Amino acid sequence: MVRGVYESAHNAAWNKRLRRVIEQATALFDGQRNWVCNTANTASLLWHAFHSLPSPSNLVNWAGFYVLDAAVANQLILGPFHGKVACQTIAFGRGVCGVAAASGETQLVPDVERFPGHIACDGDSKSEIVVPVIQDGKVVAIIDIDCAVVNGFDEEDRQYLQQLAELLAKSCDWI
């Protein structure tokens, strides 16, 4: 019962925090269409939102973006982020990010060790969620968030992050 009350309070706080991230992003994007600026601010908003909550949310160890590489077809290149150094490029279809980019579908991975072909940029990552940013039917970027515990993300995270991806798609001039 105590755990249920705790989880309910945590979920309510998290939902409020994610709604606030979307509200803040909307305000920051007003009059600003540059994708670098908007993804940099969004990475910061996400990082601080996750770290303001109890576990597992505060155990997020990477939050950021990969964007479509204009120089190489079917490849992502590292964009703004918070966390440890990261892989610089990822081919479509490789790892969680590459699968999300190739399929255009959100990847919610409770345990990265069980994901075929997972790319371990940070060995501390245990779970991951990757949400494609789609503009005019084409993946232009992905939101990538890693957590240092298994089952760090859930369906509510997916829903809010997909809303954020839609906001980014319509608010930025992508490459």
Image (cartoon, helix red, strand yellow):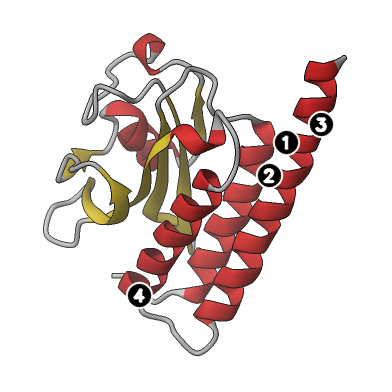
Residue on which disc 3 sits: 8
**Could you tell me residue 70's position as x and y percent?**
18, 62
Residue on which disc 2 sits: 14
Report the residue at 31% width, 54% height from top.
Answer: 81
**Could you tell me residue 58's position as x and y percent?**
50, 37
Residue on which disc 4 sits: 37
User: Element under label 4?
Assistant: helix
**Could you tell me residue 137's position as x and y percent?**
48, 57
Q: Nearer the viewer, mark 3 or mark 4?
A: 3
Instruction: Kindly report the distance in space between the C-alpha atoms of the residues bearing marks 1 and 2.
Output: 6 Å
Pointer 1 local density, CA inside 10 Å: few below 14, some 14–19, many at least 20: some
Which amino acid type corresponds to the residue marked 1 in the rendered image? Answer: His
Q: Residue furthest top?
A: 114
Marks 1 and 3 close (CB-CB < 8 Å): yes
Which amino acid type corresponds to the residue marked 4 in the rendered image? Answer: Cys
Looking at the image, tell me whether mark 1 or mark 4 is earlier in sequence order: 1
Residue 128 visible, this orientation: yes
Looking at the image, tell me whether mark 3 or mark 4 is earlier in sequence order: 3
